[in-house]
Image (tube, helix red, strand yellow):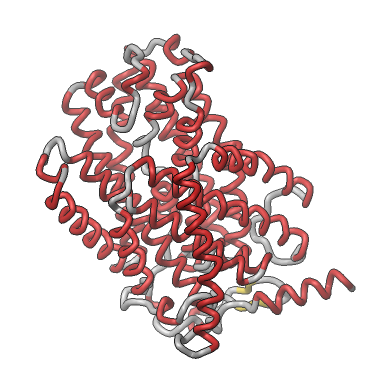
Amino acid sequence: MGEYKEAEYVDIEESLAPPGLEKFRKVSVLPLVFLIFYEVSGGPFGIEDSVGAAGPLLALVGFLVFPFIWSIPEALITAEMGTMFPENGGYVVWVSSALGPYWGFQQGWMKWLSGVIDNALYPVLFLDYLKSAIPLVSHGYPRVVAVLILTVSLTYMNYRGLTIVGWVAVLLGVVSILPFVVMCVISIPRLKPSRWFVADLNTVDWSLYLNTLFWNLNYWDSISTLAGEVDNPRKTLPKALFYALIFIVCSYFFPLLAGIGAIPLNQQLWSDGYLADVAKLIGGVWLSWWIQGAAAMSNMGMFVAEMSSDSFQLLGMAERGMLPEIFGKRSRHGTPLIGILFSASGVMLLSWLSFDEIVAAENFLYCFGMILEFIAFIVLRVKQPASSRPFKIPVGTTGAILMCVPPTVLICVVLALSSVKVMVVSLIAVAIGLVLQPALKYAEKKRWMKFSVSSTLPDLNQTNAQESTSLVE
């Protein structure tokens, strides 16, 4: 990891790392790009509702404009904070350093819970794409058994090591995107640009439209919980985020451009899975089957990437003494054994939720977490101006505040459009976190559970005290 000296991380020799960790390979740029790709996107699966909710023009404009409002600010903040704190706690450490361990724990609880809720979606979607070929898995006990088998199989892949997960993500990413490249090429002779400009503001379903854009373009910060496993994170992380941003926006925009422009518009048909039907109309049955298979593979990629982020986040929290020491236990492959088992159990318990409920609930919790991240980003710019930032967004404190305004407004809109049911359930989940942290502290005081802070990590409390003293002086 590193040691802290004069408000900055300093690289240390591998011999000083925790025993046994030096033998595990670190993640390089290419696998990291595809891990980000699957944390955020996974391909243009699920973007169809943007057309169904708002029409072709707003859908296309949304996937071009929304990244400037949300994705780019979030990616930039992740690059700066991730290189400032290159450890597995990620955004939990950012918030802890800025606002204290209590709010750091709340950040970890909300982000972990939203990640697990999100991951519960992918085994279900995987089977939804296969049920036309295998009707047996469409309902009942066979479906439940299939979800369990799929979850256990993909969880085992995470257990075997992050390097394996990274290169599997590369393979699955190529498989997921290739049929859309073919579809875009085949569609060129059939394109009619006039179809791209259809819009009717009076019929827009703003809630579905914004939730679809938000769901498809968020979670850039999730990769920060893997920073401790990245090879030279100070250089690798910003570079991977930049490449992934371009890759993801293109993977949404061009298939949407081809699909809308190549066939007559029937807006009501544009819902989840419709791109496979579009591919059939453009290229034939073979292309449709290819995209359905790619969609299934994409869900596998998103599952393993999200599972890695969630489990390493729990490991990072344990290394900071926020969770019992057992969560910091690594397998012989260097992976967080208890974190993986805990996250997989959450996925199995939540896999019965519907698609709409999952998306709305995770967006709600995710929004709360992002508000804490924006506050932490600004507070650290003020409290720790001298801290090392290998990548620093080229704006001052005022610019940092202004950069956070558009995404914060968007968060308020998304929260306001949430249903009462989602709002109540999400607020109950937040309330559990508010009492869970004091309960764990009480358990630590009574010595019912063992907590410890990794000796290789900087003391955040000492750092904050040093910074406060320097500001007073």
Residue 81's place in the image compared with 459, above or below, is: above
Which of these two is toward me, 394 or 292?
292
In this rendering, would 132 be left or right of 243? left
Query: What residue appears at the point 52 percent right and 67 percent down from the top-left corner?
Result: 89
Give the percent coordinates (x, y) of residue 170. Answer: 34, 50
Residue 348 visible in the displayed image: yes
Q: Image point 39% across, 10% down: which residue?
A: 192
Residue 232: tell me if it is visible.
Answer: no
What residue do we see at 61% from left, 70% from top? 102
Frontmost residue, 301 versus 345: 345
- Left/right of residue 368 with respect to residue 344 in the rendered view: right
Q: How many marks?
A: 0
**x and y percentages locating residue 66 in the rendered image:** 55, 34
Q: Is residue 398 left or right of residue 9?
A: right
**In the drawing, does residue 299 fall left or right of residue 445?**
left
Task: Examine the rendered structure and indicate whether residue 287 appears above or below residue 224.
Answer: above
Q: Nearer the viewer, residue 234 or 203?
A: 203
Q: Residue drawn 65% across and 60% down?
A: 390
Q: Residue furthest bottom?
A: 447
> For this rendering, which residue is in front, 167 or 113?
113
Asked where in the image residue 100 lies, by quadrant, the reply is bottom right
Image position, residue 172 (x, y; %): 29, 47
Quadrant where the image shows the C terminus:
bottom right
Q: Measured from the top left, where is residue 385 in percent x and y?
A: 76, 62
Q: Is residue 209 above or below residue 136?
A: above
